[in-house]
Image (spheres, helix red, strand yellow):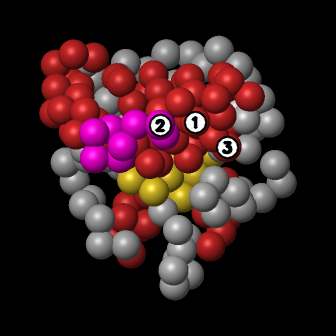
Amino acid sequence: MNAPPESAAGPVLLFDGECGLCNRIVRLLLRLDDRGELRFAALQSAPAQAFLRAHGLPTEHFDTLVFVPEWARRDKPGAEIFLRTAGAIAALRRCGGAGRGLGDLLAIFPAALRDAIYRLIARWRYKLFGPWRACPQPRPEWPGRFLGGENQSG
């Protein structure tokens, strides 16, 4: 990783850095992504906030995750982004192996059903999983995979 994460190419998952469930999902993706392709940024971070503003997405009250398949092309016209369960599935598939299998399994269900369940969980996630309490990273290479200099999943 010679380039700083903000300018790095490849996929980036934007997530609510204050949400316990969201951070647990990020940790799962870190474990599943053996190739180390995925990068992450808390929706509260400067790079994520700039992205959200540029794409007309909410910059407060986060109830979705955003998957950007090619961060280096994020501001190009027609840049592809995936929200909610489509984003989770795309991130899982990029992990390969078991992550790809889990993503393929989730994709069997209709998007409307997946997203309805997602919205229900999003509404109750802080009550069910609480806020995130940072703790040491189990693997020394993980902190370098977060944009914005913040290691929200720590």
Q: Report which residue position mark 2 lands on.
A: 108
Residue at the spot x=51%, y=84% of the render? Answer: 77
Which of the pair 129/132 is nearer the observer? 129
Labels 3 and 2: the sequence-earlier one:
3
Confirm whether the magenta stretch covers residue 111: yes
Tag 1 residue: 104
Give the CA separation, mark 1 to mark 3.
11 Å
- Pointer 1 or 3: first along the chain: 3
Most distant residue in the right direction: 2
Residue at the extreme bottom: 77
Q: Which mark is residue 94?
A: 3
Q: Amino acid at mark 2?
A: Ile
Q: Position of residue 107 (x, y in %)?
A: 49, 40
Gap between marks 1 and 2 measured at Cα: 7 Å
| Secondary structure mainly formed by the magenta segment | helix
C-beta proximity under 8 Å, tags 3 and 2: no
> Looking at the image, is mark 1 or mark 2 nearer the viewer?
2
Q: Position of residue 129 (x, y in %)?
A: 27, 17
Give the left or right position of residue 34, taking residue 23 as reference.
right
> What's drawn in magenta, residue-wise?
107-114
Residue 67 place in picture, x, y as percent: 50, 52
Q: Is label 1 in contact with label 2 (beta carbons under 8 Å)?
A: yes
> Nearer the viewer's eye, disc 3 or disc 2?
2
